[in-house]
Image: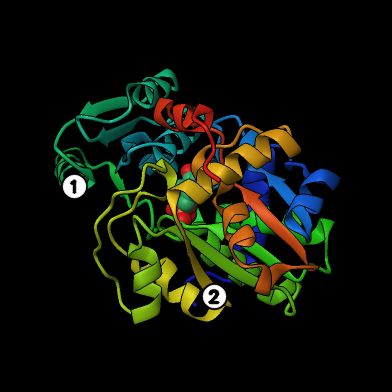
């Protein structure tokens, strides 16, 4: 195995040195609306506005002092960038983040706010990845893959320890997926702590690379057209895909409108402003009453960093 339960348990030490556990609440009006006992795990309250910061801190902890001095370089359009920049700042390590030239300026500003250097270049994440690789070779900094780095999975796995300690008898945990680090870690933790609890992944049908890779059993490339930033991934990442093969009960697709509807429901029934990716798990639950009606379910509200486009979609008239 490339990620064990022991790796997740060991990650508690660096994570809880920097961050408190996050709350998980049930809201009667939300459960009534969904027709199931729904528990919302609030990763939207993390200092960076998303769960990934747990992974960033775990990665920096694992590096030697010499490695930390050489720093990290990575590529991202959003929340991974903020996570790694936050963690690098916490450990006093240099960090360079390569982002596509058209990246959301507010996200680039947030990354700079943590003291990281931002390089804006290229049309897409693939171009950013290539440039980050060149920088790593030139500078000796560690090149960090947002999906295929075991320390990131171990760190994000700590949130599933919290979920299953708070509610040991869940029927299901539902996790939104971009690269799959969170869903892969959820499977590893659930297998150990609650073998009867099934883990479901959710992605947008407008960017189905992780879903299609899971179905075919090998990393696939797919068009990447969702407006939901955190789920916008164009390819399957091998490490989380291998873990998800054995860790998931099923992988659901929803459309962007269903995600926006779920954001509205979180806002009204759970007084929670989620970004689209943070509402995708709830959208998945609402899309499949055959799987979830009457069950006890945790939905992971993974993040709060809604873009201007997402906020505008929220304010538009709901369909129906
Ligand atoms: C990155 C992200 C996801 C997807 O997580 P993966 O580990 O890449 O699958 C979901 N929600 C939010 C808010 C994110 O930032």
Q: Name the secondary structure under disc 2.
A: strand
Residue 127: image location, x then y, percent: 15, 44
**Residue that numbered label 2 is attached to:** 250
Does any portion of residue 62 appear in the rendered image?
Answer: no
Mark number, residue 259: none
Q: Secondary structure at mark 1?
A: helix
In percent of the image, x 34 and y 37: which residue is there? 71
Up-down relation of residue 143 to residue 213 (above or below): above
User: 108 or 145: nearer the eye?
Assistant: 108
Q: Which residue is mark 1?
A: 133
287 with respect to 93 (left or right): right
On screen, residue 9 above or below 43: below
Q: Is residue 82 visible?
A: yes
Q: Is residue 57 left or right of residue 21?
A: left
Residue depicted at x 52% and y 32%:
317
Q: For residue 281, which quarter of the picture?
A: bottom right
Q: Earlier in the sequence, mark 1 or mark 2?
A: 1
Q: Residues within 10 Å of mark 2 (few under 14, many from 20)?
A: some
Q: Residue furthest front?
A: 320
292 and 14: which is toward the camera: 292
């Amino acid at each position: 195995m490339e990620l064990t339960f022991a790796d997740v348990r060991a990650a508690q030490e660096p994570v809880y040195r920097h961050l408190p556990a996050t709350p998980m609440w049930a809201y009667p009006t939300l459960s009534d609306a969904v027709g199931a006992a729904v528990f919302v795990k609030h990763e939207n309250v993390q200092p960076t506005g998303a769960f990934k910061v747990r992974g960033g801190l775990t990665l920096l902890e694992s590096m030697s002092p010499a490695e930390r001095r050489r720093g990290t370089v990575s590529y991202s359009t959003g929340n991974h960038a903020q996570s790694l920049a936050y963690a690098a700042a916490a450990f006093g390590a240099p960090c360079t983040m390569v982002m596509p030239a058209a990246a959301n300026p507010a996200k680039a500003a947030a990354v700079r706010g943590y003291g990281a250097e931002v390089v804006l270049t290229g049309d897409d994440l693939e171009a950013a990845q290539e440039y980050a690789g060149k920088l790593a070779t030139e500078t000796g900094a560690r090149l960090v893959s947002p999906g295929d780095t075991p320390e990131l999975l171990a760190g994000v796995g700590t949130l599933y320890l919290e979920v299953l300690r708070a509610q040991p008898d869940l029927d299901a945990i539902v996790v939104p997926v971009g690269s799959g680090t969170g869903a892969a870690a959820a499977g590893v933790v659930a297998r150990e702590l609650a073998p009867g609890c099934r883990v479901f992944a959710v992605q947008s049908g407008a960017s189905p690379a992780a879903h299609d890779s899971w179905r075919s059993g090998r990393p696939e490339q797919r068009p990447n057209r969702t407006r939901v930033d955190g789920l916008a991934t164009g390819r399957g990442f091998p490490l989380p895909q291998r873990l998800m093969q054995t860790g998931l009960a099923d992988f659901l697709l929803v459309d962007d409108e269903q995600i926006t509807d779920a954001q509205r429901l979180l806002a009204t029934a759970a007084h929670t402003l989620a970004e689209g990716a943070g509402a995708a798990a709830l959208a998945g639950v609402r899309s499949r009453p055959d799987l979830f009606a009457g069950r006890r379910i945790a939905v992971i509200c993974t993040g709060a960093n809604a873009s201007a486009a997402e906020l505008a979609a929220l304010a538009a008239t709901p369909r129906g």
